[in-house]
Amino acid sequence: MVQMIMPKMGESVAEATILKWLKKEGDRIEADEPVLEIATDKVDSEVPSPAAGILSKRMFEEGQVVKVGEVIAMITAEGEVAKVSAPATPAPVAASTPAPVSSNGKVSAAPVSSEPISKSSSSGRFYSPLVRNIAKEEGITMAELETISGSGMNNRVTKTDILHHLEQRGQGGSTVAAPAKTAPAPIPTPAGSVAPSVSVGGSFEIIEMDRMRKLIADHMVMSKQTSPHVTSYIEADVTNLVKWRDKVKSEFEKREKEKITYTPIFIEAVCKAIKDYPMVNISVDGTRIIKKNFMNIGMATALPSGNLIVPVIKNADHLNLIGLTKAVNDLANRARINKLKPEEIQDGTFTITNVGTFGNVMGTPIINQPQVAILAVGAIRKKPAVIETPEGDTIGIRHMMFLSLSYDHRVVDGSLGGSFLRRIADYLEKFDINRGF
């Protein structure tokens, strides 16, 4: 019997949601054949079978959240005799038992329900095996189960929901009917703080966060709780860079069949600066600093849904400008149509976000954990500026932009963060207008 394990989908990803099973129990599958579709806050992907054989047992239902490393299915390898056992369920409590023990450890006076609990109700709500077992033990009927407000995806009742309902019932509290649409689950707040309450009336519209937005929210809150953020700013004169791109972009597209944007040029400058200041290319593990000897540059990409994803260019310092352009365009295009592979959003060591795309001149980005720094590049704008010449200073029209670097003050001090940011600006300002591709 071969165990099929929920794969690791990235350093910061601890769980995934099962979107769809592609195979039924009893189906024959080949090695590396997709068995199910899963989703994280980063990407949707298929999970292939580790071996050829028969899918003998699916351990989770569609819509359930599974932790990385858990067994999600059992496969009977070819040549084995399928020995599919029924899932372990709590032993039924006899109806004559005077005081059955509830799942929350308290004595319950409710008799065991003889009414079968279906995994899906007439209203369309899904009930997991765990919730159904608790309901049966505690004598909760299907009608009562339908009145419990669910905090899970699609109003799904979780273990926490049903145990909370049992506590209220044991205290004589009234049950709360589940609304057609539930309010969004609250985003975790820092320890010791209290989330402000929000009153909802007829002038408000409640919009449930989608799965990706909930996980992004959690990831952003975790980053702010983990790293003391500091942001440094600098303004750079990128006139030569702009003139060079204007000069070569038509020839570049004609020869390479790719449009050259500013992003690969920014990535090239960042890689050069990291070589000068390698202690920005690190991560933190407790009191240990892990220095990376490779440069995997993430680029924040806005999706049509309004969410964000960060595809990663692996070993970006090994690519020339043509290679960086092709990698940037390919990853950005596939990100927008949800065609990224899991490994293409993993193992980033530094991230760039282009807030100038939206006309913003600067930003204060949140660090993409477990990295320790992130660069925001603002819009390039024509401005009057002082130009120093051997004959004296003069005023001219220059292409200027702001760069802002957020960094983890636990390990990156102002001297290092500021010097690193200044070095990126230097490489952009000293761009060779006569260089080739």
Image: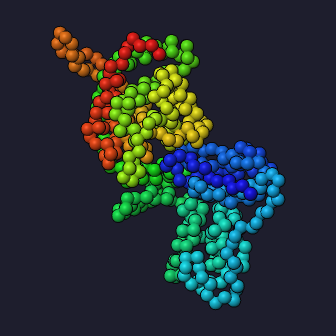
Q: Residue 250: x, y in percent?
A: 50, 13
User: Residue 339's image quarter?
Assistant: top right
Going by the image, does 425 lie left or right of 348?
A: left
Kindly identify the residue that appears in the image at 45 percent across and 28 percent down: 317
Kindly identify the residue that appears in the image at 32 percent across and 21 percent down: 429
Q: Residue 205: x, y in percent?
A: 49, 53
Kindly identify the residue that appears in the image at 60 percent across and 39 percent down: 341
Going by the image, does 294 lie left or right of 66?
A: left
Relative vertical location of residue 194 with respect to residue 225 in this rendering, above or below: below
User: Residue 34's image quarter?
Assistant: top right
> Farthest residue in the left direction?
392
Front residue (pair 154, 28): 28
Relative vertical location of residue 59 with respect to residue 97 in this rendering, above or below: above
Q: Residue 348: x, y in percent?
A: 47, 39
For residue 209, say whether it is visible.
no
Relative vertical location of residue 400 with respect to residue 43 in this rendering, above or below: above
In the rendered picture of this protein, how many numbered marks are placed on residues? 0
Q: Residue 323: x, y in percent?
A: 52, 23
> Farthest residue in the top direction?
391
Rendered image coloring scheme: rainbow
Instruction: Say which quadrant the N terminus sits in.
Output: bottom right
Kindly identify the residue that appears in the image at 69 percent across and 89 percent down: 96
For residue 172, say whether it is visible.
yes
Front residue (pair 149, 43): 43
